[in-house]
Amino acid sequence: MKTKTTSQKEKWLLIAMILSMCTWGTSWTSAKILGNYTSSINLSFLRFLLVPLSLLPIAFFTNTPLKVKQKGWFHVIGASLFILLYTLFFFKGVHVGFPGAGGVLVTTINPIFAYIIGLFLSKVFPKKQEYLGLGLGFIAGLVLLKIWSNTQQIFDLGNVFFLLAALVWALMSKISSHANKFGNAVGFSFWVHLFTLFVLCFIIDFKVLFRDLNNADNIFWFNVIYFGVVNSAIATTCFLFVSARIGAEKASTYIFIVPSTAVLTSWFFTGETILWNTIVGGILGIFAVFIINGKFRKKKTKVNLTRNIAR
């Protein structure tokens, strides 16, 4: 039987996870607003500057070491390159496309890409329900892209960037999944962002960056702090913290909060129209992920087992 203290802890963990996912969803709209002030590469630089600065006090107050084992630096470099590409595609996509639709498209298609990459690397063929899930995920992507109304829809610049972002994030996630073998998630994230910041220093035009910063207003600085500190550092760290306590499988289901939050905030702040295909495609994508992970099969097995015991 759960104690009152345990129930309170679980309640706070639940609230923390929901707030983190809502923050992730809102970040799509925040990125859209930031795109009106400066280029995607400048925004990427600011993000990779703020995240390490934010993680330092978090690591200090939680007594979390930032060390990475020698064998882990290869994964740090690989993850850095992919997260840089993701951030560039992310800002490009929301700048020329719609943040609400992008939030649904990327978070729905990303698990499909991640699963296909895992199958390719492990060379294990899908099971029946996995084929069904992948097929449903493919249909979800077509619905999100509204491919039937225009065969060229998939080649719209915003959609291309969103699809590339989903693919690159899946590759980065595959590399980062080994983070715990070389240290901890906070330390791994710190060095990944710091290394990426170092790379950007060689390709960014600081004169243009400083010019844009001088012309920025309070709305810009609010969204920069929100995106770089609240979203990229605090919310992500909170997600990792809660995941370590409730399990990665259970924690991953909370990501389904992101698409709806992205759509609602985009509608409220930028006036983006909520299209029916965005809603339907997002729902189909969620079902696809559940089927791939065997959620329905597990529940069915549990019910059958309960019935057998009752007999």
Image (cartoon, rainbow, N blue to C red):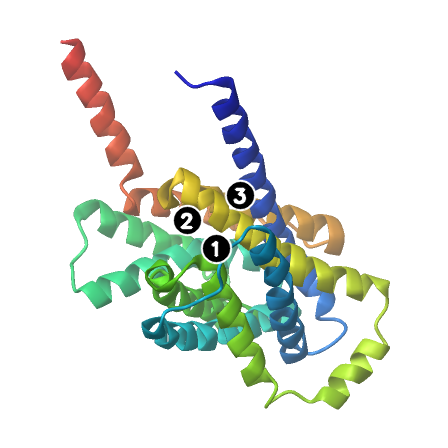
Q: Nearer the viewer, residue 194 or 301?
A: 194
CA distance separating discs 1 and 3: 10 Å
Q: Calculate the distance from the C-alpha at mark 2 to the C-alpha at mark 1.
A: 9 Å
For the residues labelled 3 and 2, the Cα–Cα distance comes to: 13 Å
User: Circle 3 sits on which residue?
Assistant: 257
Q: Is residue 111 left or right of residue 208?
A: left
Residue at screen point 78% across, 83% down: 210
- Quadrant in the picture for residue 209: bottom right
Looking at the rendered image, the quarter that the C terminus falls into is top left
* Residue 178 locus on image (x, y percent): 33, 62
Q: Relative to 218, say whether 74 is above or below.
A: below
Whichever of callouts 2 and 1 sits on the residue coming sooner in the sequence is 1
Sequence-wise, the earlier of marks 1 and 3 is 1
Q: Residue 141 at x, y = what percent?
A: 42, 57
Q: Is residue 146 visible?
A: no
Instruction: For marks 3 and 2, give the one nearer the viewer.
Output: 3
**Mark 1 residue element:** helix
The amino acid marked with disc number 3 is: Ile
Kindly identify which residue carries mark 2: 285
Q: Which residue is mark 1?
A: 107
